[in-house]
Amino acid sequence: MSPRTRAGHGSRAGPLSARPSRPRGRPCSRKLSITRQAIGWWQRQGRIEGDPTIGIERRPAPPDRTKALAENQIAALWRLDVALREKTQWKMLYESAARADEVLCLNVEDLYPHDKRGRITAKGGATEWLHWQSGTAQLLPRLIARRTRGPLFLTDRKAPAGTSTLDVCPETGRARLSYRRAEEIFEENTRLPANPLASPDDIEDLDGWTLHRLRHSALTHDAEDGTSTPMLARSRHASVRSLERYARLGVDAVARHGAERDPAVRRRR
């Protein structure tokens, strides 16, 4: 049955009309968005006239309060046997609380290693400073080697033909590491730390962490340590109010609070 037959002439009849009027959570919202994109394409092609999704509302996904990684999870991340590129990238993301695309767009000539900072193009196009700490500072010289310009984080292979010259290292011929590939590598390597009770045999069926969780964790840990809201703004959020989500206590702080007030512990003192 063609799209025109299912939803032609402004009719809402058909399978799509049986959808619930209020989709729940992020998966449904994502499917609704994909469906509307397809409908828009069909309309531009003249294959349908109506929109069977009219009246269906998008509902925001419930917030996930577990995005901030615990201290032992961060420690497990640093112990992973991964390449120098990944070690440096992950350290920089956590220590700077930067967005992954900001870090991946860094060039060697943007770095000020002695000052532990780099010049980035932030969300919205503004040029700002990104600051890191000693962990990143110790790894950067080895990653940069003798390079003096070009993308900081590179792929393992030569750049394919047609790659923008801005994304190719002029000294090695390799391309800038993409966000998609960086996310894939991180997710694949964190499947076991993210699922500590799982068997290594089941690794293909597990889900790892996302790069954004390093940024979320850094800001949450800063807030737990008493960092002021203006200083949390180093994350370059457009609105200070949006930082409120990171000011919640993380899993370690709640665990310490419970342990300190555990009656059994008190009796042993």
Image (cartoon, rainbow, N blue to C red):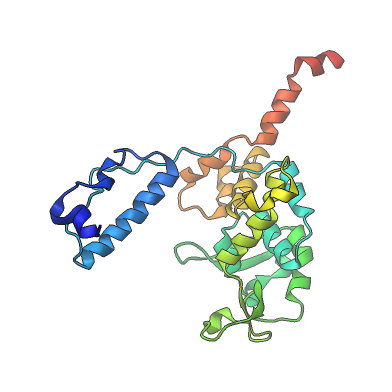
In x, y percent, where is residue 235? Answer: 56, 53
Residue at point 16%, 49% (across, down): 11
Residue at point 46%, 67% (across, down): 125
Q: Residue furthest front?
A: 1
Quadrant housing residue 178: bottom right
Residue at point 62%, 76% (across, down): 151
Q: Residue furthest left?
A: 9
Q: Nearer the viewer, residue 116 or 41?
A: 41
Question: Which quadrant of the rendered structure holds the C terminus?
Answer: top right
In x, y percent, where is residue 198? Answer: 71, 43
83 versus 20 height, above or below: below
Q: Nearer the viewer, residue 3 or 217?
A: 3
Quadrant housing residue 186: bottom right
In this orientation, does residue 67 appear?
yes
In x, y percent, where is residue 41? Answer: 27, 64
What is the number of callouts on the image?
A: 0
In this orientation, does residue 50 appear?
no
Quadrant housing residue 111: bottom right
Residue at point 76%, 14% (across, down): 263
Horizontally, residue 7 falls left or right of residue 71, namely left
Q: Residue furthest right?
A: 268
257 versus 229 height, above or below: above
Horizontally, residue 46 falls left or right of residue 207, namely left
228 versus 95 height, above or below: above
Question: Which quadrant of the rendered structure holds the N terminus?
Answer: bottom left
152 versus 162 height, above or below: above
Q: Nearer the viewer, residue 183 or 237?
A: 183
In x, y percent, where is residue 187? Answer: 63, 55
Horizontally, residue 232 falls left or right of residue 195, namely left
